[in-house]
Amino acid sequence: MAFSRHIFILALVAGCLLPSGVQALWPIPTTLETGMTALKISPSFSFDVQIEDAPSDLLDAVAESQYYLENDKLGRLVVGRGANDTTALASAMTLSNLTLSLTSGATVDSISSEAIKPLGTRSEEYALTIPADGSAATLTANSTLGLYRGLTTFNQLFYYYGGVIYTLIAPIAITDTPAYPFRGLTLDTSRNYYPVSDLLRTLDAMSWVKINTFHWHITDSQSFPLEVVQYPEITINGAYSPQEVYTASDVQYIVQYAAARGIDVLMEIDTPGHTAIIGATYPDYVACFDAAPWADFANEPPAGQLRFALPEVMNFTASLLSDVAKTLPSSYFSTGGDELNTNCYTDDYPTQQQLNSTGTTLNDALDTFTQSTHGALIAQGKTPVVWEEMVLDWNITLSNETIVMIWISSADAAAVVEKGFRIIQAPSNYFYLDCGAGEWLGDDPTGNSWCDPFKTWSESYTFDPLANLTEAQYGLVLGGEQCLWSEQSGPQNVDPIVWPRAASSAEIFWSAKQPTGAALNVTEALPRLHDVRYRMVQRGINAIPLQPQWCALRPDACDLYA
């Protein structure tokens, strides 16, 4: 489908601001044409899916869209919440139908199958047209995944007042396509456990802002809540309790739920560091297990890392990763590789004995270990994903297809792409959602979090994914994600700590710029993000307020120099 790149802007004021109080869309579409006519949704409004043998998950998505349309009941974020719109609505035409169709020749696959295709091969683009005269609206795409993205946009366009669902900006014409193929959110479920219901609710919210990857950091030194059928003792000894486990059926349900919402699940089992908990089941496989003082051997307690130089540990890890990876449909699997503490091995007798007897170095052993574990994943058809230290701190051989996640600093991206690797931008100085909550370690009352200060949505929103890169390297940037590490988070606060802040990177990596071609900027974005937040609340997400409601109802009135 040839989506026009021509930008239509009919009723936009200077700076690409939508008409006052109608600042709904997030992420902002690639091209946008709007009018100034009121249009009401008919009480008998219907979705017309003109696709033969439409997949069941598309029909479910349409039903979900119908539910949101009828039940969001979001009043416009203006003083009076829409009370002044009644005059315009009195003479407004009525929209009765949205027609969904695929372009001629398009293959009809499920949303779920489209969502897990390799990066760069997914078709997420769509075109949405809503006439002002009440004739049928149309949503067209090359895939069911594109239709799903378009449905999320359609639902953002409408408000509610006095029993009427409406927009004030008809006619509307949108063409939209993501700037980057990877748009993610990391959640750590090892430091603290999140019930399945919390993960599903998070996936829902991710889908509303077109985030397409759930990076599931499922295990760490503190707990191993993942059930692995071939290694049941790891979970029995490693989970906080039998109730705080992701069973094999839980994982499959979460993966299927995500895929139906256009989200791929990238699972991470961090190795060889961040693995102390494995020592509770295999004590001979872990060096410096629960050693004290922990700070000499680990970035946080408890200490303990895999004895990766030992052949039996290498074989065990390759088998463990392979057994988990083969149950997952994603083309990607992360082996972590961050924060490996070499002090742990300096006086570790089994490690030193192995190194001395084979005449190898710790670096050599890590190279062999990584080639073995990654080889096992590649044999399962998976592309390995690692943290940046595996490229910058160690001299090891990685497949050219390996994807590298930038986390320590945004400044590190250039050094990684210089080596030719594709990257995902997740720098802690912009995208770590846990920063700024204060020290979580005991006996340190004046301490701060290591990545202070708190990363506001607006600071995150200023991130430039291409900073310090050459134009020839731009194609190595696959996208990015915000991350929640859970030392101080759990089901009690996951909604407000993630939302709506995580929407900021969603727009960076979907839109990259405004429809006019101008750079994204926080002044233009804030009213739209308010809208996202208030709509999320209507849908049951406990998203934190960005400002007092007085400010949300008066765009720009609370700017620093207003």
Image (tube, helix red, strand yellow):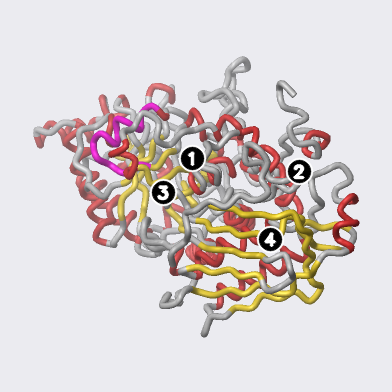
**Residue type pointed to by label 1:** Gln
Q: In which quadrant is the N terminus drawn?
A: bottom left
Q: Type of residue at label 2?
A: Ser
Residue 188 is left or right of residue 120, and the answer is right
Q: Over which residues does the magenta segment extend?
A: 411-423
Residue of label 3: 268
The residue tagged 2 is 20
In front here: 37 or 50?
A: 37
Q: Residue furthest top?
A: 446
Q: Which mark is residue 171?
A: 4
Residue 77 position (above or below residue 196) = above
Q: Position of residue 85 (x, y in %)?
A: 86, 53
- Is residue 283 visible to us here? no
Q: Is residue 82 above or below residue 460?
A: below
Q: Residues within 10 Å of mark 4 (few under 14, many from 20)?
A: many
Foreground disc of the pair 3, 2? 2
Mark 3 or 1, which is nearer the eye?
3
Looking at the rendered structure, the kind of residue marked 3 is Glu
Q: Name the N-terminal-most of marks 3 and 2.
A: 2
Asked whether residue 197 is in view, the answer is yes
Q: For the residue marked with disc 4, what is the amino acid?
A: Pro
